[in-house]
Image (cartoon, rainbow, N blue to C red):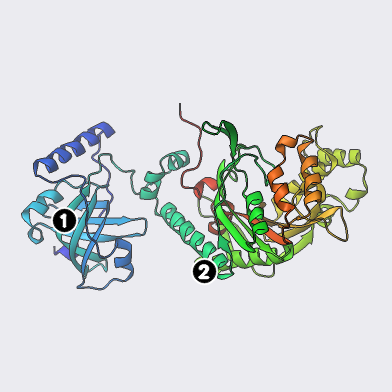
Amino acid sequence: MSSDEHPKPSAGPEPSGSTESDLIAVRREKLAKLRSMGIDPFGGRFETDTTAGALKADFADGRQAKLAGRILALRDMGKSKFLEIGDVHGKIQVYLNKKGLPERDWELAETLDRGDWIGLAGETFTTRMGEPTVKAESLTMLSKSLRPLPDKWHGLADRELKYRKRHLDLIANPASAALFVLRSRMMAEVRAFFHARGFIEVETPMLQDVAGGAAARPFETYHNALGMPLTLRIAPELYLKRLLVGGFTKVYELNRNFRNEGISRRHNPEFTMLEAYRAFADFEQMADLVEDLVCTLAEKFLGTLQIEHRDDEGNLIRTIDLTRPWKRARYHQLVMEAAGEDWFDLDPAERRARAESEFGLEIGAALEDHEVTQQVFEKLVEERTFDPCFVTHVDARLIPLAKLNPDNPQVIDVYELLINGQEISPGYSELNDPDAQRRRFEEQSGGDTQLVDHDFLEALEYGMPPAGGIGIGIDRLIMLLTGAPTIRDVVLFPQLKRKE
């Protein structure tokens, strides 16, 4: 049989009947052998001129190539070996032959295992089976893997193990690796999108004296040198608005927020948030901006505005249609369509009773009347809205940082973008009246002045231009565009409870 008739390399199970400790012992014996040969098992600098993925994507026979990668599969044919090497960007087949390698390199080849990182130089050719391949002419050990990898064919099926040991998930599950590469490319495009529109990227403090910009429980810490308590930020909003005061007319931040609250498929204690502010704009213009951004990402990276969401077995759950223009509807109208045209004609006790008896909501005694309506909205509207909908003109008591609508001061000029049963992005016509903002903060804090950011209020008194502002939960946006069922699938290292 000629070399190009050999089958493709197989991940192949480790020797049957061997325990993990047995397999580790064998690998350590190979480690010792490498050292006895004068070879550093953990390598060093190795010059490459391509990668496995790039070489395969632009493949041609007869090219000389220097590349490096992890051995993902290995088939030992005695005097020849077929490997598959790669990284998160792709993989390619490698052919090793005893006659084609220097004696020392062949001795090295005899110590190889799945998981090892190697460097090689060689010439490309295509096998009779049509597989792009590199015939190695030299071999270098870059890192000896001392633990056996997960079975390639079964991958890392246990979800919790995937999240706890993401390094193994990325090796065993190409789809996971591809998702995180895609996320990185999307983040780069988000920055390019805002830069092309004249926005400046900034960084604001993550350690804050007063946790402001949202209603959430913060993580608390203490700064020893300053002798003062601090919190991890729950939102960058109040600092970004200070920059509007300072003369930044288009500004955004793409960074981490922290909220000491529950963990669920849509919530992680630390998450990536985009906030952007544009002077002289309003919430409707910011809605246009967000619609443009999401559609740009979908068309560039997915090639479609029809986003399929599937279950673990690949069955289609739903298709989300991002075709423009997106629906815009007022909050009160959507509530009435869902809860009854007479909803706002009922007295508070009747609303509470209907929410509990007809809609099955558990309404705590401490909830105010507008919060009862918000509970109904979340269950009957938000959770059932899958195609994009900008919900506008929300009850003024729900959001303290937006402008009152000039025609109806009971509502505020905002949108909440709903897609796939969750909020993806809020946007405001920002409140820039310092006296009105002070009253709102004091109402929200229940009279506890320590919870009011007085420095921010003082900054507003110097004059903040009218502005539109947006927030976008990046993790949720990636979930939406990739069809990921949980936030843990799009966060490299999600927070987990410590194992006992």
Q: Residue at x 83, y 58 (%)?
A: 405
Residue 183 visible here: yes
Please tell me which of labels 2 and 1 falls first in the chain.
Answer: 1
Residue occupied by mark 1: 139
Of residues 81 and 31, the one drawn nearer to the viewer in this rendering = 31
**Separation of marks 2 and 1 at Cα, in angstroms:** 39 Å
Quadrant of the image for the C terminus?
top left
* Amino acid at pointer 2: Lys
Residue found 83% across the figure and 54% down from its top: 411
Tell me which residue sits at (86%, 51%) in the image: 340
What amino acid is at disc 1?
A: Leu
Q: Is residue 87 left or right of residue 239?
A: left
On-image quarter of the N terminus: bottom left
Left or right: residue 258 compared with residue 131: right
Name the spot of residue 188 as percent of width and height, x first: 49, 62
State which quadrant residue 321 falls in: bottom right
Q: Quadrant of residue 167?
A: top left
Q: Which one is in front, 88 or 16? A: 88
**Residue 300 tag number:** 2
Image location (x, y in percent) of residue 236: 62, 49
Task: Give SS at disc 1.
Answer: strand
For the point 27% across and 69% down, which residue is it?
A: 130
Residue 319 % position (x, y): 61, 61
Determine if residue 298 is in view.
no
Please indicate whether residue 322 sits to the left or right of residue 356 in the image: left
Mark 2, other Cα within 10 Å: few <14 / some 14–19 / many ≥20: few
Please tell me how crowded label 1 is: few (under 14), some (14-19), or many (20+) other residues with Cα within 10 Å: many
